[in-house]
Image: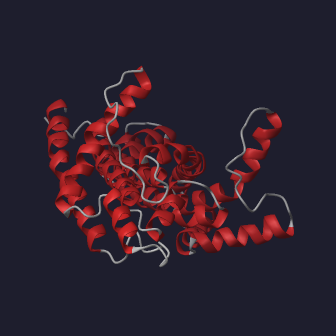
Amino acid sequence: MFQYTLRRLLIAIPTLLIISLVIFLLLEAAPGDPLGQVPLTVPPEVKAKMRTALGLDAAWYVRYFLWLKQMFFIEPMHLIDTLFGTDLAQGAQRVISFQSRQPVMDIIAERLPQTLTVVGSAYVVGVLIAVPIGIISAYRQYSWFDNLGTFISMVGFSVPTFFTGVALIIIFAVQLKWFPSVYDTTLQVTDWASFKEQLRQMVMPVTVLALYNAAQISRFMRSSMLDNLGQDYVRTARAKGLTEKVVVLVHVLRNSLIPVITVIALGVPQIFGGAIITEQVFKVNGLGQQLILSIHANDLPMVMTLTFIFATLIVTFNLIADLLYGILDPRIRYD
């Protein structure tokens, strides 16, 4: 497995470089000008100096290789400086946001905790709900529980998250006044009262995202369980006298998790990417909202960096999912 992992990591390097080039060229070809919102009263020579200061007067390939240097060398060195107090990146130019003129990675570090708190909690809750529902629905196929789970899953997967979010706001925030409609990103948890307030404001966005995630994963779990429940090894296990609990929760579940692991692993990058629509609905100051604001402002460094980070996470968790296959199924060998 070590050799397989090493090969995949070596393949991932050119893959990510190609992805970064494609993202850069797409952003370069996109309509809009980072200086498009500059007032018309600004003299042309001043606007030209602003363009030079942002590096927009350089050729696209010069700006691309500069971004590569900043992203892969300067930013890691700055992180080392921050953690260990060194000065490896002293005076080096970091990736700077056009919109705020602050380092892009600093803005991401500020917003990441909000995204992980809301979207990460929702994903964990969704997985914890979806897996048991999928197991029970498959084992008791066509029962009232299976029919109810199928109905809720179809609703959760079909109804857009912005509709669910607005519906929860109208019912539980406006009418019943149980939860706040706007997420307070300035709230700091220092005592029990602030902790309860944090939980209150997380309930609705977490519910919206957990319902959507659970709907998808539970359907995959149910389908995979049904495929394995009819296999010969299940009948053999029952004929050997194993209890039904051992057959279902040990043998069938382990094999059924293999395709589900892919769905769960590929959903993890969405946690770091943020839930763009849900964050907008509940005013969560996360990375999804930042991406929308940056696109509107033509903040190319921010959009480029965020998009590349999402692509890197997808490639990484693809590899993790493949490695988990070998752990769940001893028949799978990579070396």
Relative to 175, residue 67 above or below:
above
Please tell me which residue lies in front, 109 or 197. Answer: 109
On the image, the x and y values in percent for residue 2 come to 18, 30
Relative to 234, residue 43 above or below:
below
Please tell me which residue lies in front, 64 or 269. Answer: 64
Q: Name the side, left or right, on which 43 lies relative to 147.
A: left
Res. 143 visible in picture:
no
On the image, the x and y values in percent for residue 172 come to 80, 64
Which residue is farthest right? 176
On the image, the x and y values in percent for residue 117 come to 59, 45
The residue at 54%/61% (across/down) is 289
The residue at 36%/57% (across/down) is 301
Res. 145 visible in picture:
yes
The number of callouts visible is: 0
Q: Name the side, left or right, on which 232 lies relative to 12.
A: right
On the image, the x and y values in percent for residue 170 come to 77, 72
* The quadrant where residue 73 appears: top left
* The quadrant where residue 173 appears: bottom right
The residue at 79%/42% (across/down) is 196
* The quadrant where residue 79 appears: top left
The residue at 43%/38% (across/down) is 250
